[in-house]
Amino acid sequence: MFEKIFQIWKLKDLRNNILFVLLMLAIARVAAHIPLPGVDVAGLKNFFANNQILGLMNIFSGGGMENFSVVMLGVAPYITASIIFQLLTMVVPSLEELSKEGEYGRNKINMWTRWLTVPLAIVQSLSMIALLRQSPGSSTLFAGFTQWHLIIAVVSITAGTVFMMWLGELISEKKIGNGISLLIFAGIVSGLPSMIGRTVSTYNQSDIINMLIFGVIAIATIALVVFITEGQRNIPVSYARQMRGNRMVGGSSSHLPIRVNQGGVIPIIFAISIILIPPTVAQLFVKASTPWIASGAQWIIRIFADQLFYGVSYFLLVVAFTYFYTAVIFHPDQIAENLQKQGGFIPGIRPGKSTADYLQEIVVRIVLPGALFLGAIAVLPLITAQLTGTQSLVVGGTSLLIVVSVVIETVNQINAQLAMRDYDEI
């Protein structure tokens, strides 16, 4: 390991990229501690600690929500905008064609995603403030919050969301992990010292069983995430011998790796972003003047508070988004076309459409166990929470899942850059 670290430090451009990413994460953490005026921040932290849904929201804001900071929404509006455009790309033919136009098409869709992030940030900031103000037990937290404070808060939160989106894109450009995932990762890791401190300060012997169960769940989660993330199927590829000028080239054999979980942590982020929307929106209509709207909102809140319904929904969304994201990033037609252009073929499979169909069949089959494993790992902490009666395990399990996946993804990208530089030196 130390040899790898020394190798990274010796390469100036890679070292500078990693230092730049660390600087951007540090700036994001500073922004998460700049509070907006008009709210009792200390009381808000205790309020979040006792609310499971708001605790999950706080994870994806990087801890900025419980501080009522300028970046309290984190990258949630950007994630929502990305989901919307990826869904539209699959159902709108013009967007589908645009996505196939290479870098130009991707840049165009990314630009529209950024534009959509702004109105979504405005709507979500208004909704979040209304949710916090209407939640039971929060009346004293917003005692000095005026309409002027509301306008300042919405403008500042929207600007903070755009700022976080910009930081995430700057990080992604350095090819040291996914910027959005790393920002969420930094928020989770920054909360570990305070969580450990609270655990130590409130420790008593009766909690030893719960801590042991949580330790077993943590180790099992790490092992399963590493196993699934690193798992892949190697499809053999042969290259025909061809005459190029006076030289005979080709005739070699290689393999095409297909990962079991190609989406990494993105399906988890998408699933939680979607599952939090119904109870969040329902909170806004609890005090509606129309009786059936108010009763419907209360029913939605009650049903999502049911751990069984919540766990099943969470599991199904993780599985669905694993398939969805794999379909977005894996294009068997393009792979089959590139293989054919390079004179490559899969033994026993005809080049062209037959190869694309074969690859699609393989992906559907190997993504299924990956999606089921990922969904099972996601809901495993919910089961543990029922056994121990500790709601913090739900948040901790989700956090652990994201942290391990992001670390693996980042390490793989760094190793890929090291391998590329070794190849260039040959």
Image: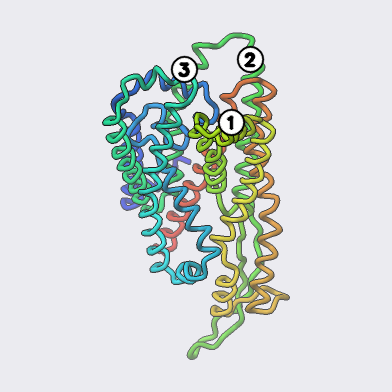
Please tell me whether residue 378 is drawn above or below residue 257 in the rendered image. above
Sequence-wise, the earlier of marks 3 and 1 is: 3
Q: Mark 3 points at which residue?
A: 197
Q: Residue at x 56, y 48 (%)?
A: 267
Considering every residue shown, the one lying at the far bottom of the view is 246
Question: Residue 170's spot in the image, x, y percent?
Answer: 34, 50
Q: Is mark 2 on a helix, strand or loop?
A: helix
Residue at 50 percent of width and 32 percent of height: 288
Residue 2 lies, in percent from the top left, at 45, 40
Report the residue that reaches farthest toward the front: 290
Q: Earlier in the sequence, mark 1 or mark 2?
A: 2
Which color scheme is applied?
Answer: rainbow
Residue type marked 1 = Gln
Crowding at dot 1, Cα within 10 Å, few <14 / some 14-19 / many 20+, comes out as some
> Could you tell me the amino acid type at mark 2?
Ile
Q: Residue 208 carries which label?
A: 2
Name the amino acid type tagged 3.
Gly
Q: Which residue lies furthest to the right in this view?
A: 348
Could you give the CA–CA distance between mark 1 and mark 2, rounded to whole angstroms?
Answer: 37 Å
Whether the residues at callouts 3 and 2 have beta carbons within 8 Å, the answer is no
Q: Could you tell me if residue 10 is visible in this image? A: no
User: Residues under labels 3 and 1: Cα distance?
Assistant: 36 Å
- Which secondary structure lies at badge 3? helix
Report which quarter residue 22 is drawn in. Answer: top left
Horizontally, residue 167 falls left or right of residue 218, namely left
- Can you give x and y, in whole percent of width and height, for residue 32 in the image? 35, 32
The residue indicated by pointer 1 is 298
Q: Nearer the viewer, mark 3 or mark 1?
A: 1
* Callouts 1 and 2 close, C-beta under 8 Å: no
Front of the two marks 1 and 2: 1
